[in-house]
Amino acid sequence: MLEKGHSLIRVEMLNWGNFTGYQEAVFRDQMNLGPLFAPPPASTILGVNGSGKSTLIDGIMIGLLPFDNLLKLGVTNDYEKGAAGGRSMTDYVLGKYASTTGKENKNLSNVYNRESGCSVLQLCLQNNHSPASYISAGLIWWYSNYQIQDRLLYITQKDMRVKDYCGAAMNLPKNGKKFKETLMEKYPSSQIFDTAQSYFSTLSTLLGGITKEDLKIFNRAFYVKSIENIDHFVRENMLIEEPNENLEILLENVANGNEITQQIAKCRDKIQESEKILNEFSHLQKVLDKLEQLEKERSFLRLFQQWEPLKKNEEETTTGQFHKEKL
């Protein structure tokens, strides 16, 4: 037997899933051997397809972690999508038929097999170090017209059975108020909760601080149905990042490298823009040089135009003087 922690020794179900009436699964025999999840050597749940193995296992998980959004329930394959797998707590309470989705039938009698009544799910765990210490934890629902009307959660640190508060005939309390009165009369130290969170906080403390994440992994481990999927399960649920100074430095350098790369890219863009401006400036300078050359040519042309009449007059004057001298 494990020296620490607790072993699950019994699961009691009343109107749970497709089980009608009272059902009990005992994981420790009269010889005090064979607790579930503790050697020697281990417990095995066997049954043909549809016999209720998943219904029992999901009941255990709901008793430990009663949050629909954290559990995969009624999963029919290893990779079924959806926050809660194939079913919900309500489906188990009302006895949902396996072949329906609940959305395709407006007539709820074609979806669920329990219209009104009461359902109970209760676990009993034994302290491995102190065998005389027990924890009985459970949930009880009341429903009418296929709708959940009330739910209570409770914990008793005793080896309690469902029949202890409803009798061998399973005459269940009619409502939450009557249940509280009956339970507190039989077990005055019991704790009754209206919310799943307060129930889980208390149960977690009693079980040594077990966390929601621990139980989520436990839930997913149930549905690793083939050897080839163990690697996927381990990688997805069990590998964790360990702090590593060198890794942190490497990641910081990578981040710095990425920042430097971005800055280099920005500089490259600016250089390309500058090159465009320089090319345009060079072209402009050529245009200015050309204009300056044209301006010089224009000035020269103006001087020539001014000089040419003067030269012509001078030539005419010189020619006239030559004729006079000759005469």
Image (tube, grey):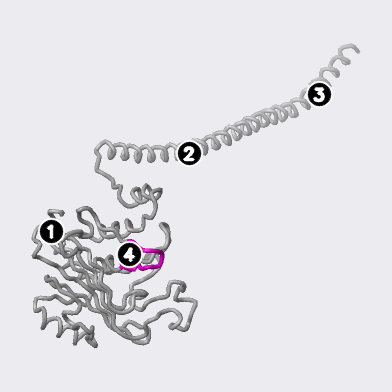
Q: Residues within 10 Å of mark 3 (few under 14, many from 20)?
A: few
Please state the extent of the stretch shown in magenta in the rendering: 46-58
Front residue of 325/91: it is: 91
Q: Earlier in the sequence, mark 4 or mark 3?
A: 4
Q: Is residue 265 left or right of residue 319?
A: left
Count of labels in the image: 4
Front residue of 8/280: it is: 8
Q: Which mark is residue 270?
A: 2
Instruction: Find the distance from the CA under tag 4 to the CA under tag 1.
Output: 27 Å
Q: Residues within 10 Å of mark 2 (few under 14, many from 20)?
A: few
Instruction: Find the distance from the CA under tag 1 to the CA under tag 2.
Output: 72 Å
Amino acid type for the residue under numbered disc 2: Lys
Instruction: Find the distance from the CA under tag 2 to the CA under tag 3.
Output: 62 Å
Quarter of the image for residue 138 reads bottom left
In what element is the residue under mark 1? loop
Image position, residue 7 (x, y; %)? 18, 60
Residue at the spot of label 4: 71
Tell me the mark number nearer the camera, choosing from 4 and 2: 4
Amino acid type for the residue under numbered disc 4: Leu
Residue at the spot of label 1: 128
Instruction: Find the distance from the CA under tag 4 to the CA under tag 3.
Output: 115 Å
Tell me the mark number nearer the camera, choosing from 4 and 1: 1
Tell me the mark number nearer the camera, choosing from 1 and 3: 1
